[in-house]
Amino acid sequence: MKRGIAALLMAFLLAGCGAPGGSLSAEESIDDAETVLHGETFTAENGCANLALTLPESWEGETADTPEDGGTDACHIEFWPADAPELRLTLRAYPDGIGLCGTGVTFEEVTFASGQTATACAEQIDDVFWLCLIYHDTPGAYAVEFSGDRTLLEQYGQPLAAILDSAVLGEGFPRQSEAEQVASDAFAEDYKEMRAQFDMNAGVWTVTFLAADAAEVGSLCVGADGKLCLVGNEADARLCGLPRAEPAGDYPAAFMLNDTVYLLSQDPVPTEVGQDAIIGYTVSYTDTFPEKNGESNFSRTAELPVAQTESGVAVYYEGVWRLCTAAGRKNEGLNKLR
């Protein structure tokens, strides 16, 4: 591990919560922390949640691919030193996210040598020390938890720092930052902030865009391949801002007009649309993604009228004027949608 990173983690484990002196310092733990990464790797998975952890020979572990009775995790790995089984920590995947409570919880930011970052949350309640290390930028929520004697963490803080650094979480799925980048590149409406949530059952990110007043502007879904996608049913498709209207393959229903690609929505125009509002027509069909003006991939019927309304651009489809969301202009990041 990097010297500064080990120092930060060890400072939290040993000193950040008022631990007494006398333990090995972070400076002394650097070389040892490097060596413990060579050991047995434990893995667990359930649905689209998966995790892996490397333990040194002097540590033991066990995995579970199903939740504990009454538990909220998807899968987990428990691990502990062979000579101190009472120091039992658990790495879990949380499909419903992580909720924290308590008035005395302290927070420290940790950056590992691998590049992973996390928030270390801790609280001392009488003789019980509670620690929750929540990893950042993962496909869903993952955390390591411990509750017990703080002095054991002091004693084994050196190998523990490297073990926590070895965690591989949500392998095969886009990280949160990657999903947000794909969605923001494709979303053309104005927004203030975005929020991303990963479905550990479906393996799909939903990225929601919010206005300054926190009102939802729209949302897009990003699949395991890092591309915008449709989800399994019409209700979910509407939730994700992507319609189920005869999509071609895995492409969202869309058309191109005036060098701009528009995604079809299920929302009707709330007012009447007159002939003077029409700005163009679809003229051809493609079974991939629209690349030419007038091209659509959701209807083989030519000359669907497109209008500019007070609520935005709309297309007349299946007897209804449907609002559309501008995904971007030609050659400006549209490859992200393919």
Image (spheres, helix red, strand yellow):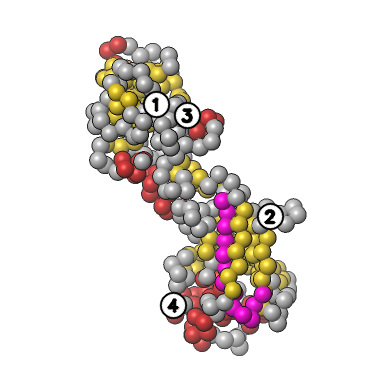
Q: Which residue is mark 2?
A: 66
> At numbered mark 4, what does the secondary structure look like: helix, strand or loop?
loop
Instruction: Give whichever of discs 3 and 1 has the lower sequence position.
Output: 3
**Direction from residue 188 to residue 217 in the image, left or right:** right
**Label placed on residue 277:** none
**Label placed on residue 2:** 4
Count neighbours of disc 3 (C-alpha within 10 A) and say few if under 14, some if 14 to 19, many if 20 or more.
many
Q: Nearer the viewer, mark 4 or mark 1?
A: 1
Q: Which residue is mark 1?
A: 298
Give the amino acid at mark 1.
Answer: Phe
Instruction: Give whichever of discs 3 and 2 has the lower sequence position.
Output: 2
Span highlighted in magenta in the image:
48-60
> At numbered mark 1, what does the secondary structure look like: helix, strand or loop?
loop
Q: Are marks 4 and 1 in contact (CB under 8 Å)?
A: no
Picture layout, residue 28 above or below residue 19? below
Give the amino acid at mark 4.
Answer: Lys
Q: Nearer the viewer, mark 2 or mark 4?
A: 2
Quadrant assignment, res 281? top left
